[in-house]
Image (cartoon, rainbow, N blue to C red):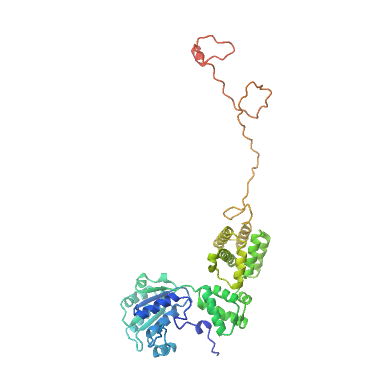
Amino acid sequence: MSDYVVSARKYRPETFESLIGQDNIAKTLKNSILRGQLAHAYLFCGPRGVGKTSTARIFAKTINCAHPGPDLEPCGECESCISFKEGRSYCIHELDAASNNGVDDIKNLMDQVQIPPQTGRYSVYIIDEVHMLSAAAFNAFLKTLEEPPAHAVFILATTEKHKILPTILSRCQIYDFNRISVNDMVEHLESVASKEHIDAEPEALTVIAQKADGGMRDALSIFDQVASFTNGHITYRSVIENLNVLDYEYYFKLTDFILENKVPECLLTFNDVLQKGFDGNHFITGLASHFRDLLVSHDPSTLPLLEAGASIRERYLAQAQKCTAPFLFKAMKLCNDCDLNYRVSKNKRLLIELTLIQLAQLTEPDTESEGRSPTQTLKPLFNQARPVQASQPAAQTSVASEPQPAYQPPQAAPAPPVHPNPMQKIDTGKKIPVMLSLIHI
């Protein structure tokens, strides 16, 4: 059997200096050791593969080291450091709560806590995946965690802090570990590649770092896989082929088609993506990320948010100049809506194709402001009669000489002249006043 060790174990951090992306936590722990202000319980929480257990081991070695360095790093030469490295330390204990989550396991731990350390100053108990403990185990552990012996230090590690009882959280110093940035992972992968004498392109390592999603352990595992696939010559093309990652070229080409309002070319590009075996949801989320990268490339102040290689970065900068900020806002919203509706859609392909059609119509001059579909003007089916304007009667005009309108509302009769004496004789041909007619009635 060969002595091969995977990179995630071979290059596991052994000092605070070798921790990746957790400088603030390392500084805080080193200062607490320097000032002699050690808590009896710590809680390390964060995503997987970001160094929680490694930090706990380094911290445990440092507080038990007989001759720590000036920068508070374990010496690696004293009996405590050597025994821990060889796996025979009696003052540093690790417990996997995923498989030892019962009340009996916690009772055995409580009995063990009472025994003082044989070498070193502290008995450190590292409980990994502590959120897997049962409710009864948490309650049994609560009293020991509240009043532990002076030589006992508990370090709890978990990926799901919300599952831990509030009574446990209130008795611990909580350290939230961050996801490791793409740039930090790329730098570490370059260091590992140089030590292993592996040729790796920066763009290929960037894809590996993005695929790892903030976990250094995942990035090193993917690195070993791709190194075996390429026989020690890692290229961008080999990485996307081995990891089944959609090439950047599809998104750049599709964005050009969208800007030129070429709907058929957009649909053909999407069909090519499906024929290569990629999922539609993976495609639309990747397109949304592409528009996001174009948006951060559009403004020099947000350019540091772009996580891409040197050559890909230049292409983003060039294509971002062709896009306007409102276009990118609308495109991201359309892709996000498509992603939200993808799971409940009965015809998933049609949903993405409709999104591509809407994206291709965003730059048309008659597009609505929301970025949905082009503005459509509905014409009436029947011609409506034009409204007739009331014409004022002109003086001394003949009725026969003027054209009669289609419809003319009745006009009120002119007011009769007022006479001082209603009994006065009225000329024939004139209308009888209203007052006189009432009298005769």
Would residue 93 be visible to someone looking at this image? no
Would residue 330 be visible to someone looking at this image? yes
Where residue 235 appears, as percent x and y from the top left, is: 62, 78
Front residue of 322 and 220: 322
Q: Is residue 316 above or below residue 10?
A: above
- Residue at image point 53% right, 79% down: 188
Q: How many marks?
A: 0
Q: Residue furthest front?
A: 300
- Residue at image point 61% right, 51% down: 375
Front residue of 347 and 51: 51
Where residue 112 appears, as percent x and y from the top left, is: 34, 84
Q: Dividing the picture into quarters, in which one does residue 69 lie?
A: bottom left
Q: Is residue 195 above or below residue 376?
A: below
Q: Is residue 344 above or below residue 141?
A: above
- Residue at image point 36% right, 73% down: 168
Front residue of 319 and 282: 319
Front residue of 157 and 82: 82
On screen, residue 335 versus residue 141, left or right, reads: right
For the N terminus, give its image quadrant. Answer: bottom right
Where residue 40 appears, as percent x and y from the top left, is: 34, 78
Where residue 305 appears, as percent x and y from the top left, is: 53, 68
Q: Dividing the picture into quarters, in which one does residue 76 lie?
A: bottom left
